[in-house]
Image (cartoon, rainbow, N blue to C red):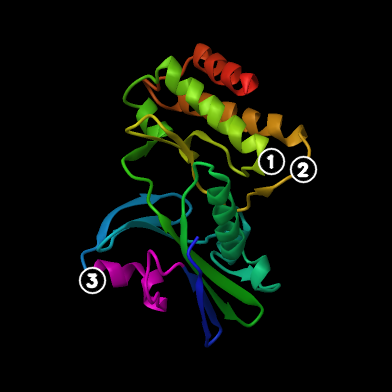
Amino acid sequence: MTDLKQTNEKGEIIQFNPEFLPNCQSNYFSPEFWQQRNAIIGSATGRGTTYFIQTQHHQLVLRHYRRGGMIGKLLSDQYLYLGIESTRAVKEFNLLDKMNNMGLPAPTPVAYRVRKTGIYYQADLISLKIENAKDVHHILQTRPLTESEWTEIGKTIGLFHQHQIYHHDLNIHNIMLDDMGKVWLIDFDKCAEQSGNAWKQQNLDRLLRSLKKEKNKIVNFHFEQQDWSFLINSYQAD
């Protein structure tokens, strides 16, 4: 990775890769900044809204960290500050950087911002958008995957597991397939390198639960038990 740059002022820390965002400023983490420049090319809604941005040379993904569950109703986007290295933005940025260096198919980190107020902080992350890719959840609502596509998903998950990368939320929304047939994993918030092997089966179980849940919820969701066999056989083969 190109040498990173960092700014630190007024309780705000920004670190960025100037190869993708030269002279990154605080307003780059504001959706309104990009809206005013007609640079937002799409969005996705989950716990919060993720924005897709077109700059002069790159397509970016901007995400603001938000809490879920009951605590999210009280502290929607505030986290206890225990030092910059403990913030979710820095942890995810560093993990993405490490996985990129390993050659794993994960997003490329571009920038993060951490804003500290008292004992709490808020954070944002910018990464490169994966070109010409759709999440598998979306694809399965329109068509079945081929045996080779399920095989590639199993092989890719196996690759992350071989490198001891634990994905906290391995569900069908967080697996992408691009137009060249390459599989990517996304959303590495609360993920980490993790020793041992017991968690790997739990990761796979979580993914299967998400597939069954969507199958029960969505009419014509193209997932069958045979598809899971293709995935698992490929995962185990590697």
Residue 17 x/y as whole percent: 45, 67
Image marks 2 and 1: residues in contact by CB distance under 8 Å: yes
Which residue corresponds to mark 3?
A: 36
Identify the residue at the far front of this view.
2
Q: Amino acid at mark 2?
A: Ser
Quadrant housing residue 208: top right
Q: CA distance from mark 2 to mark 1?
A: 6 Å
| In the depicted structure, whether residue 226 falls above or below residue 11 | above
Indicate which disc, 2 or 1, sits on the residue closer to the N terminus: 1
| In the depicted structure, whether residue 167 falls above or below residue 37 | above
Image marks 2 and 3: residues in contact by CB distance under 8 Å: no
Residue 214 x/y as whole percent: 47, 28
Quadrant housing residue 158: top right
Q: Quadrant of the C terminus?
A: top right
Q: Is residue 96 left or right of residue 178?
A: right
Q: Mark 3, mark 1: which one is toward the viewer?
A: 1
SS of the residue under disc 2: loop
Q: Is residue 40 left or right of residue 164?
A: left
| In the depicted structure, whether residue 29 falls above or below residue 12 | above
The magenta segment is 17-36
Q: CA distance from mark 2 to mark 3?
A: 46 Å
Which residue corresponds to mark 2?
A: 195
Q: Residues within 10 Å of mark 1 (few under 14, many from 20)?
A: some
Which residue corresponds to mark 1?
A: 164
SS of the residue under disc 3: loop
Tell me what residue is drawn at x 53 percent, y 15 percent. Answer: 230
Q: Amino acid at mark 1?
A: Gln
